[in-house]
Amino acid sequence: MQDDPTPRELIGAAADFLRNDIMPQISGHSAFKLRVTINALDLVTRQLTLEPASDDGERARLAELLGRDASLADLNRALAEGIATGALDLETAGLRDHLWQTTLDKLAIDQPNYGSYKREVERSRR
């Protein structure tokens, strides 16, 4: 086990420094490139935070759906093959829910401010 700070904390501190201390001092194309960099750091922070549980959930859903245990990559290959051959479709019990949850998990990491994603998350909380 590594000592603190964690990679997530280090990346967050770097992004906060750039956002709060450097961003107010620059403009133009440099400011645009800095925003892109900050967004990339924020995305990596979300990946470090959310991806392990997301991957675990996806693997568990796929194992149940496909009736076998394997790595996430192998299960996703089997899912794609099953869809391609017609062995699996949206009428397959659990497939639609799996695809929807996987999409929401990916959006939580990649585009958490996407309007439709935010509305769906809010709707599911009710």
Image (cartoon, rainbow, N blue to C red):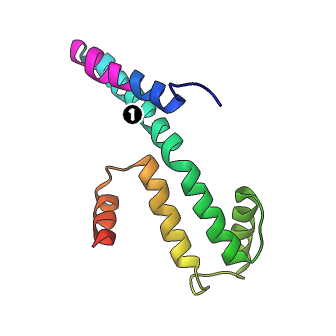
Residue placed under numbered mark 1 in the picture: 39
On screen, residue 55 versus residue 110, left or right, reads: right
**Considering the numbered disc 1 on the image, is that residue within a helix, a strand or a loop?**
helix
Give the answer, above or below, for where 108 lies relative to 101: above
Question: Neighbour class for label 1 at 10 Å: few (<14), some, many (≥20)?
Answer: some
Q: Position of residue 49 (x, y in %)?
A: 49, 43
Q: Amino acid at mark 1?
A: Asn
Magenta-colored segment: predominant secondary structure = helix
On screen, residue 125 versus residue 67, left or right, reads: left
Q: Position of residue 95 (x, y in %)?
A: 58, 77
- Comparing 6 with 45, the one in front is 6
Q: Position of residue 16 (x, y in %)?
A: 34, 25
Q: Residue furthest top?
A: 25
Q: Quadrant of the N terminus?
A: top right
Name the residue located 33 percent from the left edge and 66 percent from the top edge.
120
Name the residue located 70 percent from the left edge and 71 percent from the top edge.
63
Q: Position of residue 22 (x, y in %)?
A: 29, 15
- Comparing 54 with 4, the one in front is 4
Name the residue located 45 percent from the left edge and 61 percent from the top edge.
104
Q: Which residues are magenta?
A: 15-25
Name the residue located 36 percent from the left edge and 50 percent from the top edge.
112
| 31 is within the stretch colored magenta | no
